[in-house]
Image: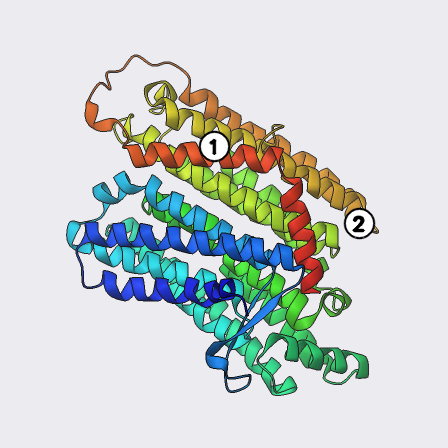
């Protein structure tokens, strides 16, 4: 066994340990520790990605050297390495980019609590990426839920308490359905390890035994993770959760939390139930339909927003619809496009939330577009980052969003029956709607307005500047140099299957 394989459990364990240590130290020390640990996790995931790409297949890490069912397993292939690296990089940039917001929005006595939750969130995301056991995935789904709720309400005002309550109610509904689905699956297969469940499900599908319970299980697992990832119409908690939390929290929630659940759903498609069984039970058609509706309704609602954070939040509903549309196509090309859009949307939406903080700061704290006029001129880097993010969401060439839409169009062309035309037409309509609200927002922040914002306290810090520059570079990287990533996703899905 290569020493690199030890990076997989370490990426989970050190973040758990970081949460424990953060509870005993002051806020600034907790921040430095968290940034150090996330950086270490990113480096370890980069090593895992390089190792698995060279290896050409996955490897399994047996915890404590006890095989299942007595022990637990972690599985790593190139797709898991890619997602682990992406999650850790976005987490690092989101924490660094929101440092100023953390100081302003979180009381000093609660700062270490905030970083306890960041560490728990990071650990749960790594576990969702690497675990090979379905019940272990459920345990870390719950840890993820508690950490996300705390990240929302850490700001401690009426809005965040209401938002956190809504999030908790919807998330617990999803968690309950997920647990029921896993319990039913265990009752008919007697397995919790993903490959073992897959073998049992294949035998059941071939024999026709437990056909109705299997259909119910597939529905429960899919609906549960759709609720937790805010697929329309299960999105009611999302606008307030993103709109009233801190900039770092909004960036993490929009870019990572929902994507962790979607990646778990993809693992269930390939490694637990099997893609053929999923397609055979028509769940892909249902997800496709809700994805299409979400793409339109999220954009239509975003057009009506006058608050910049709510606009970005409702845009996320539309972008999650894109991902589910790709999954719903039921093809390898559609799944590759969906996974790539997880990366594209994550890199872009976190940048938008961090950038809007800088624009709001130079507009007397107002989030209304009327007051944001000229903010891109007063805070140039935030203005550029917001414009790059907005143009990426619209689908301007050379940016990540454009490449995503090309891959979705490519997948739609290869689709069968009416899905091709529905997907292509919806892509066109959604792109036009994206252009309406994002270009309007960009024009607004660059429209000059004669007001005095000379107070130097509104100047962003060096960490925010570095994070925004890295976000911009990452967006162009995904837009221009997408083929290696596309190839890695394709290889990873092939290994999955």
Say which quadrant the N terminus sits in. bottom right
SS type, badge 1: helix
Q: Residue 217 location in percent, x, y? A: 63, 75
Residue 198 occupies quadrant: bottom right
From this view, report whether residue 217 is shown above or below residue 158. below
Q: Residue 79 location in percent, x, y? A: 60, 56
Identified at 18% across, 63% down, the residue is 24
From this view, report whether residue 396 is shown above or below residue 168. above
Q: Residue 229 location in percent, x, y? A: 51, 57
User: Which mark identifies residue 427?
Assistant: none
From this view, report whether residue 260 is shown above or below residue 303. below
Which residue corresponds to mark 2?
415
Q: Residue 487 location in percent, x, y? A: 68, 48
Q: Nearer the viewer, residue 269 or 72?
A: 72
Identified at 41% across, 49% down, the residue is 91
Residue 172 occupies quadrant: bottom left
Q: Nearer the viewer, residue 35 or 232?
A: 35
Say which quadrant the C terminus sits in. bottom right
Residue 75 occupies quadrant: bottom right
Q: Total marks drawn?
A: 2
- Is residue 176 rendered to the left or right of residue 289? left
- Is residue 210 rendered to the left or right of residue 323? right
Identified at 55% across, 84% down, the residue is 68
Which residue corresponds to mark 1?
472
Q: Residues within 10 Å of mark 2 (few under 14, many from 20)?
A: some
For marks 2 and 1, the one nearer the N-term is 2
Nearest to the eye among marks 2 and 1: give it: 1
Identified at 55% across, 46% down, the residue is 343
């Amino acid at each position: 066994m290569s020493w690199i394989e030890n990076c997989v459990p370490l990426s989970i364990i050190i973040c758990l340990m970081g949460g424990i240590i953060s509870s005993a130290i002051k806020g600034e020390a907790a921040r430095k520790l968290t940034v150090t640990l996330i950086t270490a996790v990113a480096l370890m995931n980069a090593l895992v990605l390089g190792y698995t790409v060279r290896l050409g297949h996955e490897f399994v890490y047996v915890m404590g050297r006890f095989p299942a069912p007595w022990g637990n397993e972690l599985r790593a292939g190139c797709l898991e390495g890619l997602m682990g690296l992406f999650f850790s990089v976005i987490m690092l940039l989101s924490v660094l980019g929101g440092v100023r917001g953390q100081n302003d929005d979180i009381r000093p006595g609660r700062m270490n609590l905030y970083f306890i939750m960041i560490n728990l969130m990071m650990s749960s995301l790594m576990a969702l990426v690497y675990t090979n056991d379905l019940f272990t995935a459920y345990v870390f789904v719950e840890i993820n839920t508690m950490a996300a709720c705390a990240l929302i309400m850490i700001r401690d005002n009426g809005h965040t308490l209401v938002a956190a309550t809504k999030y908790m109610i919807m998330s617990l509904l999803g968690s309950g359905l997920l647990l029921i689905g896993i319990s039913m699956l265990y009752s008919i297969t007697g397995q919790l390890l993903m490959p073992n469940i897959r073998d049992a499900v294949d035998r059941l599908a071939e024999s026709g035994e437990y056909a109705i319970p299997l259909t119910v299980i597939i529905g429960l697992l899919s609906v549960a993770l759709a609720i937790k990832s805010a697929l329309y119409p299960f999105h009611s908690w999302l606008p307030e959760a993103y709109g009233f939390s801190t900039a770092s929290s909004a960036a993490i929630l929009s870019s990572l939390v929902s994507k962790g659940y979607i990646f778990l759903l993809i693992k269930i498609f390939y490694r637990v139930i099997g893609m053929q069984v999923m397609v055979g039970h028509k769940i892909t058609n249902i997800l496709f339909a809700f994805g299409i509706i979400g793409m339109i309704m999220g954009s239509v609602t975003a057009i009506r927003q006058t608050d910049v954070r709510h606009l970005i939040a409702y845009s996320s509903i539309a972008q999650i619809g894109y991902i589910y549309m790709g999954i719903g196509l039921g093809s390898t090309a559609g799944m590759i496009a969906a996974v790539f859009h997880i990366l594209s949307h994550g890199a872009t939406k976190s940048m938008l939330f961090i950038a809007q903080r800088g624009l709001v700061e130079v507009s007397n704290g107002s989030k209304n577009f009327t007051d944001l006029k000229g903010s891109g001129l007063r805070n140039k880097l935030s203005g550029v980052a917001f414009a790059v993010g907005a143009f990426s969401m619209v689908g301007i060439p050379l940016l990540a969003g454009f490449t995503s839409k090309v891959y979705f169009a490519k997948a739609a062309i290869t689709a069968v029956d009416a899905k091709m035309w529905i997907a292509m037409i919806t892509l066109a309509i959604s792109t036009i709607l994206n252009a309406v609200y994002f270009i309007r927002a960009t024009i607004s922040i660059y429209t000059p307005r004669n007001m005095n914002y000379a107070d130097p306290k509104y100047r962003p810090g060096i960490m925010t500047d570095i994070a925004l520059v890295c976000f911009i570079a990452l967006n162009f990287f995904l837009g221009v140099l997408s083929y290696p990533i596309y190839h890695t996703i394709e290889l990873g899905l092939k290994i999955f299957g």
